Amino acid sequence: MAARTTFSSTLRERIEADLAGVDADLAARYPGDPGTRQPVHTVYVPADALAERGVGDLVGDWGRQALDLLDRHAPDAAALAAVVGQIDAPLAVDVHDRVRAKLEREPVEDLRIDFEDGYGPRPDAEEDAAAERAARLVAEAVADGTAPPFVGIRMKCMESAVRARGVRTLDLFLTGLLDAGDGALPEGLVLTLPKVTYPEQVAAMARLLAGFEEATGLPAGRIGFEIQIETTQAILGADGRATVARMIEAAGGRATSLHYGTFDYSASCGVSAAYQSMEHPVADHAKAVMQVAAAGTGVRLSDGSTNVIPTGPTEQVHAAWQLHHRLVRRSLERAYYQGWDMHPGHLPTRYAAVYSFYREGLGAAAARLAAYVARTGGDVMDEPATAKALSGYLLRGLDCGAVDATEVEKAAGLDRKALDALAGR
């Protein structure tokens, strides 16, 4: 006997029709994680740093400097654990070994050649030459395999005083890169738009990239860009609305990530220089708004940086490392899985914090995920959303080299494909 119901088919069909637009909007605005690798950091270098050397040489030099600092100031696992004070002894050897291997193999995951604050105003002919040189050197590094997985430029912003210069630099760089790549752009190309205050500036950037694609025959939507959140207007507009959410919409699907700018944003809030920090309350507020605005959209998040550099005597290096390691760990715990590094000395503690974060939680996360898949429950009754978060955690650990596929599969009983499915990728 059929179950008895009350709602009429006409009413059910009307509900479906009423919500069809909402369904389409949800699918378009909130597609979820793109399923690609996210770098754990971004390294910014001024464009003139490439004047005498290639991209691979610069990256290799950062790795060598980082290794030298590590060998001088934390030569073994016990020394590193003692310095940062946040790595359990059983993990210390593995973390130290992995950090050394990373610095030798791939010290920089994401390189941004800076034409903005780190470069400053230059004569037009000088910046033209630097933009063309950057395109040529990036193309050469991609071709010979010495480029980091992600590389690109930060142009000047869309404010009137520097807009024309920023647009020209972007044009020269993209055109040179496309010409050097025989009509193709590198897969890991990343562009950064700084000091955004209005959604219209984001829309203008999107139109520029669409125009470039149309003029060169590239697929529509091929080029995305990062939005740097460095002004109060980017968080809260004059109308009281969350501007950053409107910026994501204005990008038309091209926004790849939101990057918090520690010092510009703090200064715009009136924070004194001595107290400008990634953990200041104004920073936490801005990043919380960014996080909610980006949730589910596929737009990723990056924290900012510390300007305390690990140089000088050992005591000074250790103090800077302790601060940096703590800040990176704090960001990770708050679901900011990327940040900026300003100096080669930041690399050892960046990777130490990232690797210990993923390695120390591997067993518990794998066990909970295995119990969820097997429906055995375990000590915690997890829901699908938590399973998604657990699998995402393991995938990020795999992507950055903190954990290996064999140990994840052994602990969780799940391969990469299964993890991707659970993470909704």
Image (cartoon, grey):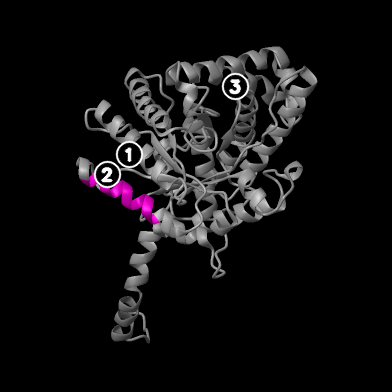
Residue 337 located left or right of residue 220: right
* Residue at position x 48%, y 25% in the image: 48
Q: Is residue 98 visible?
A: yes
- Looking at the picture, does residue 115 appear above or below residue 297? above
Question: What amino acid is at disc 1?
Answer: Asp
- Mark 1, residue position: 171
Q: Secondary structure at mark 3?
A: helix
* Residue 29 in the image, given as x and y percentages of width and height: 39, 60
- Mark 2, residue position: 212
* Residue at position x 64%, y 43% in the image: 263
Q: Nearer the viewer, mark 3 or mark 1?
A: 1
Stretch in magenta = 203-214
Question: What amino acid is at disc 2?
Answer: Phe
- Mark 3, residue position: 99
Split into 4 quadrants, where in the image is the N terminus? bottom left
* Residue 310 in the image, given as x and y percentages of width and height: 70, 24
* Residue at position x 47%, y 33% in the image: 122
Q: Is residue 208 magenta?
A: yes
Q: Are marks 2 and 1 in contact (CB under 8 Å)?
A: yes
Residue 24 located left or right of residue 57: left
**N-terminal label among 2 and 3:** 3
Q: Is residue 1 visible?
A: no
